[in-house]
Amino acid sequence: QVQLVESGGGLVQPGGSLRLSCACAASSLFTFSWNTMHWYRQAQGKEREWVATINTAGDNTNYADSVKGRFTISRDNARNTLYLQMNRLKPEDTAVYYCHAWPDYWGQGTQVTVSS
């Protein structure tokens, strides 16, 4: 069993910031530091969409155009934790945010709501 647990979501005003975390529990099936990690999000009534990806070493990242320049993905392999720093948040960033690893490992999600 692979357990990914997101946290850090909440209600924030437009222009504000949040930092999401995804903690990976130790497992014989999954070694966090060996896996490329991703953040996805799903807004109500919409399909889940990719947000960002980070390689195993943490020195190569990619972002969806909608978040580029505002969000930063990072990881701490010693702590088995993935992060997403979200700045200059917009109402359209409102969604449930999930961390993901191949092939089909997902967390339960954390709600981010951007509203005044």
Image (cartoon, rainbow, N blue to C red):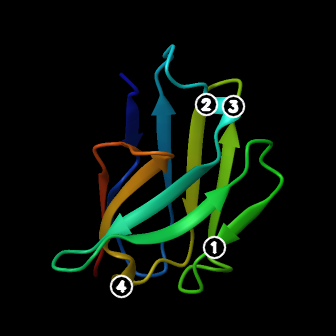
Earlier sequence position, callout 1 versus callout 4 = 1
How far apart, in angstroms, are the residues tagged by discs 3 and 2?
Answer: 4 Å
Earlier sequence position, callout 1 versus callout 3 = 3
Quarter of the figure that contains the C terminus: bottom left
Q: Is residue 41 left or right of residue 83?
A: left
Instruction: Indicate the amino acid at tag 2.
Output: Phe
Earlier sequence position, callout 2 versus callout 1 = 2
Which residue is labeled 2 in the image?
32
Q: Residues within 10 Å of mark 3 (few under 14, many from 20)?
A: some
Which residue is labeled 3 in the image?
33
Quarter of the figure that contains the N terminus: top left
Which residue is labeled 1 in the image?
63
Q: Residues within 10 Å of mark 2 (few under 14, many from 20)?
A: many
Instruction: Indicate the amino acid at tag 3.
Output: Ser
Local secondary structure at mark 3? helix
How far apart, in angstroms, are the residues tagged by discs 4 and 3?
Answer: 32 Å
Q: Residue 60: percent from the left, percent from the top?
A: 80, 58
Q: Is residue 108 left or right of residue 90?
A: left
Which residue: 47% across, 70% down? 50
CB within 8 Å, label 3 to label 2: yes
Local secondary structure at mark 1? strand
Q: Is residue 80 left or right of residue 54?
A: left
CB within 8 Å, label 4 to label 3: no
- Front residue of 37 and 91: 37
Which residue: 38% across, 43% down? 7
Earlier sequence position, callout 2 versus callout 4 = 2
Instruction: Indicate the amino acid at tag 4.
Output: Glu
Count the numbered circles shown.
4
Which mark is drawn over residue 92? Answer: 4
Q: Residue 31: percent from the left, percent from the top?
A: 60, 25
Which residue: 57% across, 78% down? 64
